[in-house]
Image (cartoon, helix red, strand yellow):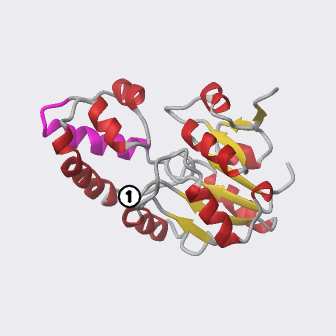
Amino acid sequence: MPTPRFVLFDWDNTLHDSAGTNFAALARVLSDYGLHVSPESYRRAYTVDYRRLYRDLGLAEERIEEASGRWRSLVAGAQPRLLPGAAAALDILVEEGARLALVTSAPRAIVEPQLRALGLTGLFAVAIFGDAQPPRPDPAPLLAALRELGARPGDATYCSDTSADMRMGRAAGVHAIGISSFAFGPAMLCAGGAEATAPSVAAWVDGRGIACDG
């Protein structure tokens, strides 16, 4: 594939292998409230809207902020790791002249230490974190990143693993690439507005994406 001038990435389950860590922390927090969550029930309930996630898993509304704070503490203390091939894929994009940005719904307090631990500080020309973001698919986070990059939407590609992010990408006018994850397969990502899907960022950079209209 021709290397895009600007490539914007989601973080969790796109570059960062967060699914296992997030689930373990969530299960531990909910167990203290007498709630059991299985991998299957987590997958069915999964959404980037954490309030809705907690409600759908049975947690009372008045406990959500408390539980979310405890979950964030557990996740922040976990050892981060990139998904297979992600580091090499990022290096290839940089070597081929792409400028990279991070646009995540996760808070700065969690993601910045993960970037430092993984040696990625400075790799992204722009980083937009989830603090005070409007709910997705509002395109405001992507548009903010594009402004900081000095990029036109048509010159940018956004890679993420959720249907809401595919809708956000389309609303912002960028090329939306769906990265399949535990919660969102190719059909769901295409239905959300992805131009193409790939099983990983590494596969997409390697040219193994599949067009949604194909």
Q: Is residue 31 magenta?
A: yes
Magenta region, mostly helix, strand or loop?
A: helix
Side of 144 where 115 appears, left or right: left
- Residue 163: give x, y in percent of width and height: 57, 36
| Residue drawn at the location 41% of the way across and 25% of the way down | 44
Q: Is residue 80 above or below residue 214?
A: below
Q: Is residue 128 above or below residue 171?
A: below
Residue 139 visible in image: yes
Classify residue 48 by image quadrant: top left
> Tag 1: residue type?
Gln
Which residue carries the number 1 mark? 79
Side of 178 where 25 appears, left or right: left
In the rendered view of the protein, which quadrant contains the C terminus? Answer: top right
Q: Which residues are magenta?
A: 19-35
Residues packed near mark 1 inside 10 Å, few (<14), some (14 to 19) or many (20 plus): few
| Residue drawn at the location 44% of the way across and 64% of the way down | 114
- Residue 120: give x, y in percent of width and height: 55, 69
Q: Nearer the viewer, residue 94 or 144?
A: 144
Q: Is residue 153 above or below residue 122?
A: above
| Residue drawn at the location 60% of the way across and 64% of the way down | 144
The extreme right residue here reads 2
Residue 162 visible in image: no
- Residue 14: give x, y in percent of width and height: 57, 47
Q: Nearer the viewer, residue 212 or 151?
A: 151
Secondary element type, mark 1: loop
Q: How many marks?
A: 1
Side of 5 where 166 appears, left or right: left
Side of 134 where 45 appears, left or right: left
Q: Is residue 161 magenta?
A: no
